[in-house]
Image: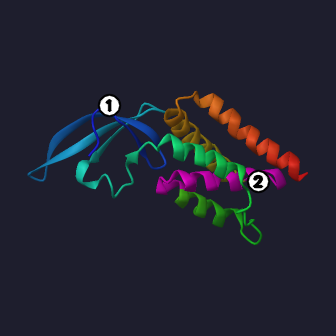
Amino acid sequence: MFEIDELVVYPAQGVGKVEDIQGKEMGGLLTQFYKIRILSNNGTLLIPVDNADNVGLRKVCAPEYGRQIFEYLRDWSDFKGYAGQNWNRRYREYSDKLKTGDLADVAYVLKELMLISQDKDLSFGEGRLMEQAMGLITMELAYTLNREQDAIRQEIEEIFSDILTKDS
């Protein structure tokens, strides 16, 4: 169970703060809800406490895991390429990965789209997915590592710039 004022991550939305745990009557039953304020857009979500695990609500990652994500972003040895895949198929695959809420899946999407964008123009949808992945990663890492989101973004962009420069 999450506590009031605890930072949590909601898949595809990002970091939020538990503002309240409130009971509401639905269908004659009293149901407990987390009231979550999404920090990136100030939106509010009500998530049934009993369903929080099923929708992927989780705590912000530990700092050590955040540092591992940076190492994962630096290591491109797992890139399998996109030969034979059209943008529509990639878009569906990447959308599904962003919906898992797993930071490693989000990092995978960002890595692949950054590399693909060096070889060819991304579709409009892929460009939006890349920005969404970047936003999700930078926000969570900023909170877990106690750094500014812009500084995290700059470091990630430098990682890709350094790797792509070495490959040229």
Report x, y in % for residue 65. Answer: 53, 47
Residue shown at 19% from the left, 45% from the top: 32
Q: SS of the residue at dot 1?
A: loop
The disc at residue 5 is: 1
Q: Is residue 36 left or right of residue 84?
A: left
The answer to the question of whether label 2 and label 1 lie on touching residues, with beta carbons closer than 8 A, is no
Q: In this image, 35 relative to 73: left or right?
A: left
The numbered dot on residue 26 is none
x and y percent of residue 42 in the render?
43, 30
Q: Hey, which residue is sitting farthest left in the picture?
A: 28
What residue appears at the point 91 percent right and 51 percent down from the top-left corner? 168
Residue 98 point in image, percent of width and height? 53, 54
Which quarter of the picture shows residue 34?
A: top left
Query: x%, y% of residue 36?
Result: 34, 37
Q: Residues within 10 Å of mark 2 (few under 14, many from 20)?
A: some
Return the mark for residue 115: 2
Choose the circle earlier in sequence order: 2 or 1.
1
- Closest to the observer, 5 or 85: 5
Is residue 140 positioned above or below 28 on the image?
A: above
Would you say the magenta stretch is mainly helix, strand or loop? Answer: helix
* Residue 104 sits inside the magenta stretch: yes
How many numbered discs sit on the rendered protein? 2
Q: Residue at x 39, y 48 (%)?
A: 58
Task: Give the magenta range.
Answer: 98-122
In the picture shown, does residue 16 fall above or below 92? above
Residue at the limit of the structure toward the bottom, as seen here: 84
C-alpha separation, residue under disc 2 versus residue under disc 1: 38 Å
**Magenta run includes residue 31:** no
Q: Is residue 76 above or below residue 35?
A: below
